[in-house]
Amino acid sequence: MSSPAQATVYVVDDDVGVLGSLRFLLETDGLAVRTFRNAAAVLKAASQAEADCFVIDYKLPDINGLDLVGRLRGNHITAPVILITGYPDAGISDRAAAAGIDHVLQKPLLGDNLIKRVRASTEQPAQPNR
């Protein structure tokens, strides 16, 4: 795993504005960021490179964030995941935990809470995942 200042975060969201905002937020905090607009693109990239943490939107155009995490885990990618959603429901936290997702955060108010969660996730001891 990279050192915290050099951690690489993969951000997946179909909204270009959200991707730009999250990239700016995370890069301003010294993180390397790769952005993706759909599950297929991140699945292809994740199989070829190492991510220290994933920030994944729940509502994606091809599959939902929970299913994407299932596919990542099925590909033996165990990096921490933070699920973001603008559509929280009563059971999403339970379903996210069952899918191996570390945290669920509500959009649009991510800010410092997202940075805190990403930093905590990337500072944990490395798990072999590729």
Image: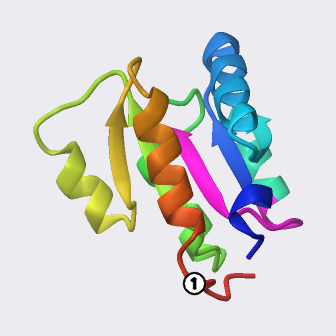
Farthest-out residue, bottom: 128
- Which residue: 28% across, 63% down? 97
Which residues, given as a range, are shown in magenta?
Answer: 46-57
Report the quarter where the C terminus lies. Answer: bottom right
Task: Please say whether residue 70 is visible from this viewpoint.
Answer: no
**Residue 37 percent coordinates (x, y):** 71, 29
The colour scheme applied to this rendered structure is: rainbow
Q: Quadrant of residue 33?
A: top right
Residue 76 or 40: which is nearer the viewer?
76
**48 with respect to 103 (left or right):** right
Q: Quadrant of residue 72?
A: bottom right
In the image, is residue 10 above or below residue 81? above
**3 with respect to 14 (left or right):** right
SS state under label 1: loop
**Residue 46 percent coordinates (x, y):** 77, 61
Tag 1: amino acid: Pro
In the image, is residue 21 above or below residue 104? above
Farthest-out residue, top: 17
- Which residue: 80% across, 59% down? 6
Q: Which residue is mark 1?
A: 125
In the image, is residue 65 above or below residue 84? below
Report the quarter where the N terminus lies. Answer: bottom right
